[in-house]
Image (spheres, rainbow, N blue to C red):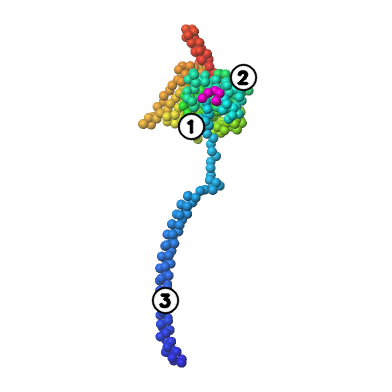
C-alpha cells in the first residue's frame, strides 16, 4: 500500500508541484498584467470622469447662496432717461408721483432750467434732465432761504459758495458727460454740482479741503440718498484736490470749482487722453471758464487745446487753496478794469458779468 502509494504519489506530487509552480507563475504574470493594465484604464477613466464633473458643474444652475453678487449700483443716468420731460405738466405730475422733492420748488426749477436751455448754457437733453433732478433747495444753506432758485452764487459758510446755477449748467454741459465716464470734481462745497453729475454718470469722485464743510455735505448727501439713491455713486474724500485722486485715475472728465491761475499738473496727468477738464482759470478775482482738451500724439507728446467757454466773460470763484490755506495762484489779484463808457452803455450786461462771483 505504502509502496503503491509512494510509487503512485511521486509522479503525482511532482506533477502537482510543477502544476502549482506554473499556475502561480501564470497567475502572477496574468494578475501583474491585469493589474497594471487595469490601473492605466482606471487612471484614464478618472481623468475623463473628472472632466465630466467639471463640465456638469458649469452646466448646473448655481444655487443663490453660491452666487457672489456685487450689490447692484443704482443707475442715475438710466433713471434720468426714464423721466418724461415733454411738457411742464407731464414732468410735474411725474415728479410728484416719483420723487420726494418739495412741490413748492418744482415750478421754479423747471423755469430756471429752461432759461438755461434758451441761453444755451444747458446744451444737451441729458444735462437738462440732470438739472431737473437736482433739488438745489437742499444744497442752498438755510441762511439763504428764499433764494434757492435765484440765478446767483450764495455763501455756504467756511468762506465757500454754491456756484451760480447758470455757471454750473455751462460747466456741466462743457464736459459732455456720457454714462460710465469717470468724473472728478475738485471742491465739493455744497454738494449741488455732485448731484447734477451723478445723474449723468455713476462714477463721480469729489474732493473737498475744508473739513467741517466736507462733513456737513457728506451728512447732507447721506440723508438725501434715501430719496435720491443715485447719490450712492458719489465717492467723496476730504483732502487737497490739487493732487487729484491717484487711486481712481485716469478720469475722463475733471471739473475744478475753485479758482487757479494755472492748470494743476497732477490733474492734467490724471486726465485721460481725449478727456476734458473745465476750470475757472485766471488770477484771483477774475477768471475765465476754460475748457481744456487733452490729446496724446502718436509720438506720445501731449497736445492741449483750450477754449474760453463764455467768450471773455469773467467770473470770480473762491481760491484753490492748499491745506495751510494759501492760494495755489501766484498772480496778483486783478482789480476789475474800468469798463469803457461806450461799451458799458451798449452792453449793460457786460458790467454785471464782470462782477460775478461763484
Ligand atoms: N462745487 C461746489 C462749489 C464750491 S466753491 C458747489 O457746487 O457747491 C469751491 C470749493 O472748493 C470750496 O468748498 C472750497 O473749500 C474748495 N476747495 C478749495 N481749494 C480746494 C482744494 N485744494 N481741494 C479741494 N477743494 C478745494
Label 2, label 3: how far apart the Cα atoms are: 111 Å
Q: How many labels does the image show?
A: 3
Going from the N terminus, do you reach mark 3 or mark 1 first? 3
Most foreground residue, 173 or 104? 104
Magenta part of the chain: 86-91
Examine the structure image and report whether residue 87 is included in the region drawn in magenta.
Answer: yes
Q: Mark 3 points at which residue?
A: 23
Q: Quadrant of residue 38?
A: bottom left
Task: Please give the residue where the numbered disc 1 appears in the rendered image.
Answer: 179
**Residue located 51% across and 15% down the image:** 353
- Tell me the distance, in whole angstroms, between the alpha carbons under discs 1 and 2: 34 Å
Point out residue 284 in the picture as x, y percentages from the top left corner.
51, 19
Tell which tag, 2 or 3, sits nearer the viewer.
2
Where is residue 231, by image quadrant? top right
Is label 2 in a helix, a strand or a loop? loop
The earlier-in-sequence mark between 1 and 2 is: 2
* Numbered tag placed on residue 146 in the rendering: 2
- State yes or no: Cβ of the residue under disc 1 lies below 8 Å from any atom of ligand 1: no
Asked if residue 93 is positioned above or below residue 48 in the image, the reply reads above
Question: Disc 3 versus disc 1: distance between alpha carbons?
Answer: 83 Å
Q: Where is residue 280 in the image (x, y as percent from the top left)?
A: 49, 22
Task: For residue 330, say whether it is visible.
Answer: no
Name which residue lies at 48% across and 25% down. Answer: 125
Give the overall secondary structure of the magenta segment.
helix
Amino acid at each position: 500500500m505504502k509502496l503503491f502509494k509512494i510509487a503512485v504519489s511521486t509522479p503525482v506530487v511532482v506533477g502537482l508541484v510543477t502544476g502549482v509552480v506554473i499556475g502561480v507563475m501564470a497567475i502572477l504574470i496574468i494578475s501583474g498584467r491585469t493589474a497594471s493594465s487595469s490601473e492605466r484604464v482606471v487612471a484614464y477613466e478618472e481623468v475623463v470622469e473628472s472632466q465630466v464633473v467639471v463640465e456638469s458643474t458649469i452646466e448646473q444652475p448655481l444655487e443663490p447662496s453660491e452666487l457672489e453678487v456685487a450689490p447692484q449700483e443704482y443707475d442715475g443716468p438710466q433713471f434720468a432717461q426714464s423721466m418724461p420731460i415733454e411738457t411742464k405738466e407731464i414732468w410735474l405730475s411725474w415728479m410728484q408721483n416719483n420723487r420726494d422733492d418739495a412741490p413748492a420748488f418744482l415750478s421754479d426749477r423747471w423755469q430756471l432750467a429752461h432759461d438755461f436751455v434758451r441761453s444755451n448754457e444747458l446744451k444737451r437733453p441729458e444735462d437738462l434732465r440732470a438739472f431737473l433732478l437736482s433739488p438745489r433747495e437742499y444744497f442752498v444753506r438755510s441762511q439763504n432761504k428764499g433764494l434757492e432758485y435765484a440765478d446767483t452764487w450764495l455763501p455756504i459758510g467756511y468762506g465757500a459758495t454754491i456756484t451760480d446755477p447758470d455757471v454750473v449748467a455751462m460747466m456741466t454741459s462743457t464736459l459732455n458727460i456720457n454714462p460710465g465716464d469717470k468724473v472728478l470734481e475738485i471742491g465739493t462745497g455744497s454738494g449741488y454740482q455732485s448731484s447734477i453729475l451723478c445723474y449723468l454718470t455713476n462714477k463721480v469722485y469729489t474732493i473737498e479741503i475744508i473739513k467741517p464743510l466736507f462733513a456737513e455735505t457728506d451728512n447732507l448727501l447721506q440723508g438725501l440718498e434715501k430719496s435720491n439713491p443715485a447719490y450712492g455713486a458719489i465717492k467723496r474724500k476730504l483732502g487737497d484736490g490739487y493732487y487729484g485722486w491717484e487711486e481712481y485715475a485716469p478720469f475722463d472728465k475733471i471739473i475744478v470749482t475753485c479758482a487757479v491761475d494755472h492748470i494743476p499738473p497732477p490733474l492734467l496727468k490724471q486726465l485721460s487722453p481725449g478727456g476734458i477738464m473745465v476750470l475757472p482759470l485766471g488770477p484771483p478775482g477774475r477768471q475765465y471758464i476754460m475748457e481744456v482738451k487733452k490729446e496724446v500724439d502718436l509720438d506720445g507728446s501731449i497736445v492741449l487745446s483750450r477754449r474760453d467757454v463764455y467768450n471773455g466773460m469773467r467770473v470770480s470763484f473762491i481760491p484753490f487753496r492748499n491745506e495751510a490755506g494759501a492760494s495755489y495762484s501766484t498772480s496778483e489779484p486783478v482789480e476789475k478794469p474800468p469798463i469803457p463808457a461806450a461799451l458799458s452803455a451798449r452792453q449793460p450786461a457786460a458790467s454785471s458779468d464782470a462782477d460775478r462771483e461763484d
